[in-house]
Image (cartoon, grey):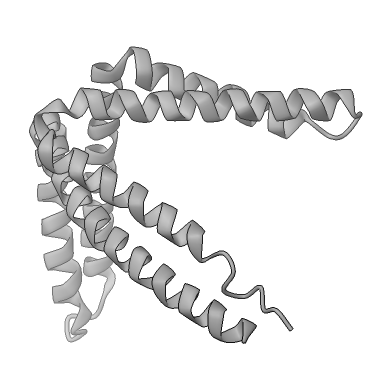
Amino acid sequence: MKSNLFSNWWSFTVSGIIALLYALLAFYNPGELSKIIGFFGIIILIAGIAMLIGTISNIKNKQPYAADLIWSILTIAAGGILTFYTTQAVKIFVIIVGIWAILIGAIQFYIMTKLDTEDKSRNTFLISGIITIVFGVILFFNPFQAAKFLLLLTGVLSFIIGILLIALSIKMKSLSKDAQS
């Protein structure tokens, strides 16, 4: 009896290769942040168009389509903004993340003040709050330098994940062959 549990090993290989390609792009082009975001925008734009085609098919087949239509339009809009207004989109995104981090840090400080003075987690909230606020301020006041750092950080993580996914796919392929025997 053939087991389908490990038969999709190739999808992990493809995902690992994509992760490694992103890592290489992030390592060798950290100064080209706008180009990387632009390429990402094109991918999102294509995905949105594909979703819209699927939604049109749902309309023709008289299936529910309202949520899919809204989602595909939003995806096309996001892809278009990232593709054609890359610099502004990156700046706005990084500033929003910076504001979010500052708010999270402030919330951590607030939680810390509500804890008993003998609670050991107060120090954790204090340190985490300080780090989060500093991170947010750096993102808010220097968005492009921070974005380049985040690009390199995600490149490192993507490289590690890519290697792990490929190793997992090799193991899954081996288990798939064992299950078929």
Residue 117 drawn above or below residue 38: below
Residue at image position (74%, 84%) is 1
Which image quadrant for residue 80? top left
Expressed as whole percent of the image width and height from the top left, the position of residue 136 reads 17, 44
Expressed as whole percent of the image width and height from the top left, the position of residue 126 reads 14, 66
Identify the residue at the far top of this view: 84
* Residue 13 or residue 128, whichever sits in front: 13
Identify the residue at the far right of this view: 62
Expressed as whole percent of the image width and height from the top left, the position of residue 149 reads 11, 43
**Quarter of the figure with the C terminus:** bottom right
Left or right for 122, reference 49: left
Residue 55 drawn above or below residue 19: above
Residue 85 drawn above or below residue 131: above
Q: How many labels, in total?
A: 0
Residue at image position (54%, 30%) is 47
Residue 60 seen in the current view: yes
* Residue 165 or residue 96, whichever sits in front: 165
Residue at image position (80%, 27%) is 57
Left or right for 22, reference 12: left
Residue 141 seen in the current view: no
Residue 44 drawn above or below residue 116: above
Expressed as whole percent of the image width and height from the top left, the position of residue 86 reads 29, 19
Residue at image position (79%, 31%) is 65
Which image quadrant for residue 125? bottom left
* Residue 140 or residue 123, whichever sits in front: 140
Which image quadrant for residue 79? top left
